[in-house]
Image (spheres, rainbow, N blue to C red):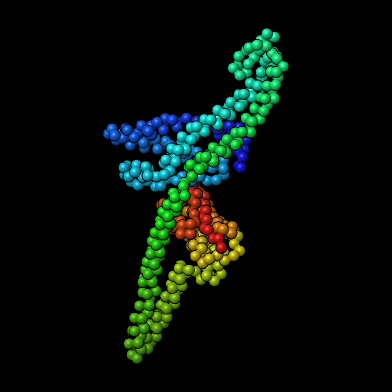
Amino acid sequence: MKQIRSHGQNLVWLAVSAVIALPAPVLLFLLLASVPASLVAGLGLVLFAAVVWVTRRLAGLQRRRVAAVLDVAVPAPYRSLPTGMLARLRSILGEAATWYDFAWLACQFVVGLACFVLTAALWLGALQCVTAPVLLAALPEPTGYDPVVLELTGRSTVFSWILIPVGIGLAVAAYRLPRFLVHGQARLAAALLTPTSKAALTERVDSLTATRAATVDASAAELRRIERDLHDGAQARLVAMSMSLGVAEDVIDADPAVAKALVAEARVGVGAALTELRDLVRGVHPPMLADRGLAAAVEALVLDTAFPAELDLRLNRRLTAPVEAAAYFAVAEALANAGRHSGATSIQVTIADTGTALHITVRDDGHGGADPAGGTGLLGIRRRLAAFDGELRVSSPAGGPTVLEMELPCAS
């Protein structure tokens, strides 16, 4: 069981739970009232939407608190809403998470208030039992003190001193119990607010569908780029070389010197075409990456940067070819972005293999302001990693630095 750091934090947690529970009766009443109100000019739809909005805010707050107690992330189970008010309401009504939120709200009202009242009652009872004999001893002889009803009655007796160990027992219970109450509330909230298996499966299918579409689009764009580079580069040079050789063939008898010059020009064109083909192949899958692996290929990338770069490499094995390619091109794109847009004077690249995932961090000292939604570079990295269930996190405040954190699953 994960224990909260202190007893005071346990009490604060229970108090906040009670505060969260207070709006529950009002929200549930408005939820029920929205049904007949929907028959009157559609006012119930607005009321229902407002209740759902407030309930989801409270549920989101509880998810964050549960994550802090159980040390386990509790993701929000809500699907993306479509456009249009009626379409959104239909989506919310048909979503199981909406009704689980209302179920949690009802349970929170009962459990949250009960736990807080129980804890407060235990502390109050402990205080009364411990102070009762002292008050009885201090009061005049004909006067007594009844800690149950908080009244001065009767006279002091020896029996009243038994309340002291009872009070100590209540204090111990009041001190020990809150951690279990907090943990129990967290478990209950996690059971009701965590996405159901069906919702998780639906979200997974939607994510895979989007990832597949992005991968297909990226592959089509890459094929178009290769076709364009071949057409505008190597193919054009080969056509020019063919024309030069044809002219040389026509004039070789009449003017050998001109034919020789044309052949020499064609040879230069062959060299340029070979260079462009090598660059094209390197852009598809670098030979060094295929021959020597990710570590050597990234070292070559870092050495080719136009500004000082540091490399912290903790990778002692070969990964699968698709994973190595994704990691290589992600680092290459990150370095290119830093060189083109950030104005950086230095950069640090860290690659660490944890056995199940490859963690890549690229940090530069540029002016910051990088936004994945504002350009194709970071968006391309995110799409490339998403094909492997990888993630890209960007931290780039104005003024810098820019830190790209990439995680790429690479389990054997």
Considering every residue shown, the one lying at the far right of the view is: 158
Which residue is nearer to you in this view: 2 or 251? 2
Which residue is nearer to you in this view: 276 or 386? 386
| Left or right of 366 in this view: 214 | left
Residue 217 visible from this viewpoint: yes
Location of residue 295 in the rendering, given as x and y in whole percent from the top left corner: 57, 64
Considering every residue shown, the one lying at the far left of the view is: 41
| Left or right of 199 in this view: 401 | right
Location of residue 291 in the rendering, given as x and y in whole percent from the top left corner: 54, 71
Location of residue 66 in the rendering, given as x and y in whole percent from the top left corner: 53, 40
Considering every residue shown, the one lying at the far bottom of the view is: 253
Which quadrant, please, contains the N terminus? top right
Residue 304 visible from this viewpoint: no
Which residue is nearer to you in this view: 21 or 215? 21
Q: Is residue 98 above or below residue 343?
A: above
For the point 45% across and 52% down, which residue is it?
201
Q: Is residue 250 above or below residue 153?
A: below
Q: Is residue 29 above or below residue 235?
A: above
Which residue is nearer to you in this view: 367 or 159? 159
For the point 37% across and 88% down, which residue is it?
256
